[in-house]
Image: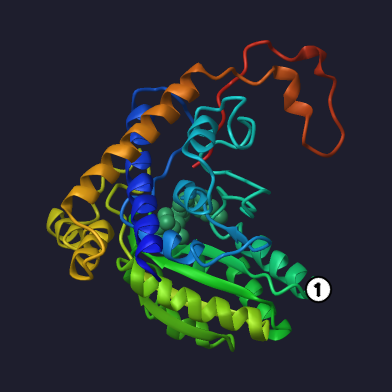
């Protein structure tokens, strides 16, 4: 990776952090509703992996999906407007925080169902193999999702059928308030995955350069051999699970210790050491992303609501009569 690319990744990580901080504030001010989870602390994982993708590749993520959408190239405006449930959102306001989707950027969806996106990404990898075009799927999910049946079914088939899927568990040590030790007997996630006959790796998810190095290697291999890989990225969320989480299951000391390894600070240190950036560049970048996020908020507030009749567009299945629809649209979201 050269200097320009490194600075691009730095800017993206700063953008995600700022976006999440401001989106959280907007949510708590009641600007939009539904359930809401942010990616603060985990930025290096999505940014490191998505930076290696090319046109035709795909990705899936859980409900913690805003960072992935931005890392894939979706704009702050279209993501923020989607959180607001507005017509200008990337899913025309019908997806909300947990169900971001972009055909253009290969995002095949966030999912409110833990483990729900894993078979979808596996299916996309099956399509890649069928077409034989060398494309891959990045399949992001949390440690808690490794205890869900769909994870096991998907990885087993990907290993058996040799599907170009990169399974990335973002091990942030907790599934809501449940620590790894309280949810699984074997807490070595890469070791667990080996049992399904898939190649595995572990990476420091707080270090974007380490993530990028592993991503280049495993994605390159998957394109070449068509085979799946499993990567355990050790990371930490700096914020509560969602907005209804009092955070009593972890100590302030633990959070503070992880904040010492803030992926943005870790990357700044690398950039300074390599002579690729200075404090001035950090300041200018922070200002730029601040403006970009404010612009996305203004844009979302000014954007129109979807027309109630649009609810029947872009969906399949038998359509009830639109006559009885209320003219007051409800903001996107819902569920946990
Ligand atoms: C099938 C299912 N079961 C339970 C829930 C409730 N739930 C929402 S998030 C979550 C924890 C998942 O943790 P993890 O996979 O580690 O992801 P993280 O939130 O840490 O990113 C649970 C149990 C759900 N949404 N779907
Ligand atoms: Mg987790």
Q: Is residue 139 above or below residue 293?
A: below
| Residue at 44%, 39% in the rendered image | 36
Residue 71 lies, in percent from the top left, at: 47, 53
Asked which secondary structure carries label 1, the reply is helix
Task: Decide if residue 184 is on the left or right side of residue 79.
Answer: left
Q: Nearer the viewer, residue 233 or 55?
A: 55
| Residue at 65%, 60% in the rendered image | 55
Residue 144 lies, in percent from the top left, at: 45, 63
Q: Label 1 neighbourhood size at 10 Å, few (<14), some (14-19), many (20+)?
A: few
Colour scheme in use: rainbow
Q: Can residue 244 be seen at all in this image of the molecule?
A: no
Task: Decide if residue 311 is on the left or right side of residue 84.
Answer: right
Residue 100 lies, in percent from the top left, at: 57, 44
Q: Can residue 36 be seen at all in this image of the molecule?
A: yes
Residue 334 lies, in percent from the top left, at: 54, 34
| Residue at 57%, 30% in the rendered image | 332
Q: Quadrant of the N terminus?
A: bottom left
Q: Is residue 85 above or below residue 38?
A: above
Task: Decide if residue 265 is on the left or right side of residue 99.
Answer: left
Q: Disc 1 marks which residue?
A: 130
Q: Nearer the viewer, residue 182 or 115?
A: 115
């Amino acid at each position: 990776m050269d200097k320009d690319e490194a600075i691009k990744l730095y800017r993206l990580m700063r953008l995600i952090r700022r976006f999440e901080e401001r989106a959280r504030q907007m949510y708590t001010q009641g600007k939009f509703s539904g359930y809401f989870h942010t990616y603060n602390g985990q930025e290096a994982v999505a940014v490191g992996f998505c930076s290696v993708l090319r046109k035709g590749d795909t990705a899936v993520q859980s409900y913690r999906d805003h960072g992935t959408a931005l890392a894939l190239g979706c704009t702050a405006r279209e993501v923020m407007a989607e959180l607001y449930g507005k017509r200008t959102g990337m899913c025309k306001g019908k997806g909300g925080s947990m169900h971001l989707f972009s055909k253009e950027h290969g995002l095949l969806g966030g999912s409110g169902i833990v483990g729900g996106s894993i078979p979808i990404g596996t299916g996309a990898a099956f399509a890649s193999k069928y077409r034989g075009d060398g494309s891959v799927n990045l399949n992001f999910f949390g440690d808690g999702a490794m205890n869900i049946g769909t994870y096991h079914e998907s990885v087993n088939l990907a290993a058996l059928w040799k599907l170009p899927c990169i399974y990335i568990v973002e091990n942030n040590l907790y599934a809501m308030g449940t620590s790894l030790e309280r949810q699984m007997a074997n807490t070595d996630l890469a070791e667990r995955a080996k049992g399904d006959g898939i190649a595995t790796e572990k990476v420091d998810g707080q270090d974007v350069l380490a993530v990028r190095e592993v991503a280049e290697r495993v994605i390159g291999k998957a394109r070449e051999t068509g085979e799946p890989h499993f990567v355990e990225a050790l990371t930490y969320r700096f914020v509560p699970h969602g907005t209804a989480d009092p955070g009593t299951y972890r100590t302030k000391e633990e959070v503070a210790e992880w904040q010492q390894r803030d992926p943005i600070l870790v990357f700044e240190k690398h950039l300074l050491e390599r002579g690729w950036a200075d404090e001035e560049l950090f300041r200018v970048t922070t200002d730029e992303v601040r403006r970009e996020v404010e612009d996305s908020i203004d844009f979302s507030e000014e954007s129109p609501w979807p027309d109630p009749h649009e609810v029947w567009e872009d969906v399949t299945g038998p359509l009830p009569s639109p006559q009885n629809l209320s003219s007051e649209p409800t903001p996107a979201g819902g569920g946990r």
